[in-house]
Image: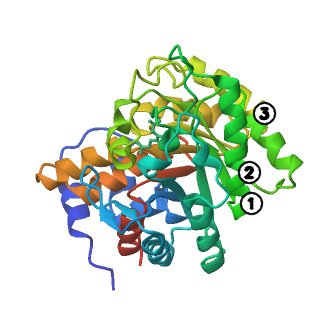
């Protein structure tokens, strides 16, 4: 017996007269199974990195980032456990430092018993498989709110900062970090950190460089979360001008020559062209960071009923991957993993 023809197909077949087309791209979109078969970009939780905030007090929601918390150490461990069950294998840690610990030289950044080293050790001892990435930069620890040490004349002391960053990376490595991620944009920091790590025997600790980090308005909610906004001036003498893409390739060349294991573009959504250039030019994996402001835009629009949150999350992450990102840092990591698990149980 002949199978019942599919109703839609019958309608198309009967629609006469028809255009003399040999190519009908819609044929590859006809059913969900065909769409799955031809999908070029397949988002999955293994490529997502969840940023987490830790502080010295109790768990606390962050008002400018609905759904995101400043965790206590125990709260953070529970969150990592919950997320690893969803398929999230990697986290990046940020500290909201108590005001009294902030100094102009950001010394708390390399305290071997500081909150980040303690948290790294705690995660690695209870969930050793989790990839623990740490942020290397001075802003959470700086009384000036800058990623580097501020000279008396207001300029940023590049080389003195790099020395402190090396100590910070070593404190993270000795606590068990898998990857250190310098987000400061000082010149020469990747090479210096690589050398410092190797000299101390941490040749297995990787570097994920924030290679093209733009001076962006989209970091606003993050700075609120850490209370880390610059007290004076802005970050335009070290973070890149949003107008430039060729310059990102120069940073890429340097970071690769200095031995980085991964390169990052940040923010992600507004810089898809830069991600694509990196994907074309880079011999190391490309990461992209969907930052706090990108997160907030979707959350705020969804909360007001103007956007469908789940669809917007998957669409933005898929677009970042389609542009060429191998790894995506996103506050939506756990939520995206939940959505993806529901779509492909
Ligand atoms: C600072 C740092 C920033 C972010 C990550 N590391 C902010 C900044 O440069 O001011 C932003 C992350 C986000 O907005 O989600 N070293």
Residue ID for mark 3: 258
**Residue 263 lies in what quarter of the image?**
top right
Decide: few, some or many residues near mark 3? Use Cα within 10 Å; few <14, some 14-19, many ≥20. some
Confirm whether residue 24 shows in the render. no
Viewer-proximal residue among 238 and 212: 238
Decide: few, some or many residues near mark 1? Use Cα within 10 Å; few <14, some 14-19, many ≥20. some
Which numbered disc, 3 or 1, marks the residue that appears first in the sequence? 1
Q: SS at mark 1?
A: helix
Indicate left or right for 332 with 248 as reference.
Answer: left
- Select label 3 or label 1 by which is in front: 1
Viewer-proximal residue among 190 and 299: 190
Q: SS at mark 3?
A: loop
**Residue 222 lies in what quarter of the image?**
top left
Indicate left or right for 284 with 12 as reference.
Answer: right
Residue ID for mark 2: 170
Q: Give the percent coordinates (x, y) of residue 325.
A: 55, 45
Does ligand 1 reach within 8 Å of label 3's beta carbon? Answer: no
Q: Dividing the image into 4 quarters, which one contains the N terminus? A: bottom left
Residue 17, disc: none
Residue at point 70% right, 25% down?
159
Does ligand 1 reach within 8 Å of label 1's beta carbon? Answer: no
Q: Give the percent coordinates (x, y) of residue 149.
A: 58, 29
Q: Give the percent coordinates (x, y) of residue 81.
A: 49, 77
Residue 174, disc: 1
**Vertical relation: 265 (above or below) 180:** above
């Amino acid at each position: 017996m002949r199978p019942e023809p599919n109703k839609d197909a019958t309608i198309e077949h009967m629609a006469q007269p028809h255009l003399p087309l040999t190519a009908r791209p819609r044929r590859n979109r006809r059913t969900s199974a065909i769409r799955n078969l031809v999908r070029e970009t397949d988002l999955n939780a293994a490529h997502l990195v969840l940023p987490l905030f830790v502080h010295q007090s109790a768990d606390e929601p962050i008002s400018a980032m609905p759904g995101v918390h400043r965790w206590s150490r125990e709260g953070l461990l529970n969150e990592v456990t919950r997320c690893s069950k969803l398929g999230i294998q990697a986290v990046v840690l940020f500290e909201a430092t108590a005001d009294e610990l902030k100094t102009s030289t950001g010394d708390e950044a390399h305290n071997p018993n500081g909150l980040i080293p303690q948290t790294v050790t705690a995660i690695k001892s209870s969930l050793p498989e989790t990839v623990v990435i740490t942020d290397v930069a001075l802003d959470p620890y700086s009384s000036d709110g800058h990623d580097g040490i501020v000279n008396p004349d207001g300029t940023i002391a590049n080389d003195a900062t790099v020395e402190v960053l090396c100590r910070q990376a070593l404190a993270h490595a000795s606590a068990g970090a898998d990857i250190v991620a310098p987000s400061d944009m000082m010149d020469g920091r990747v090479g210096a950190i690589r050398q410092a790590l190797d000299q101390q025997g941490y040749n297995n600790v990787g570097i994920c460089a924030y290679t093209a980090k733009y001076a962006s308005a989209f970091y606003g909610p993050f700075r609120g979360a850490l209370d880390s906004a610059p007290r004076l001036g802005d970050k335009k003498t070290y973070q890149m001008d949003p107008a430039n893409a060729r310059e990102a390739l120069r940073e890429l060349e340097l970071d690769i020559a200095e031995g980085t294991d991964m390169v990052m573009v940040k923010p992600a959504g507004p810089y898809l062209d830069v991600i694509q250039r990196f994907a074309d030019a880079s011999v190391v994996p490309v990461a992209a960071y969907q930052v706090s402001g990108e997160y907030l835009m979707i959350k705020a629009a969804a909360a007001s009923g103007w956007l469908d949150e789940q669809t917007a999350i998957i669409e933005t992450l898929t677009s970042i991957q389609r542009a060429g990102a191998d790894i995506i840092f996103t506050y939506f990591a756990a939520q995206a993993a939940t959505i993806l698990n529901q779509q492909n149980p």
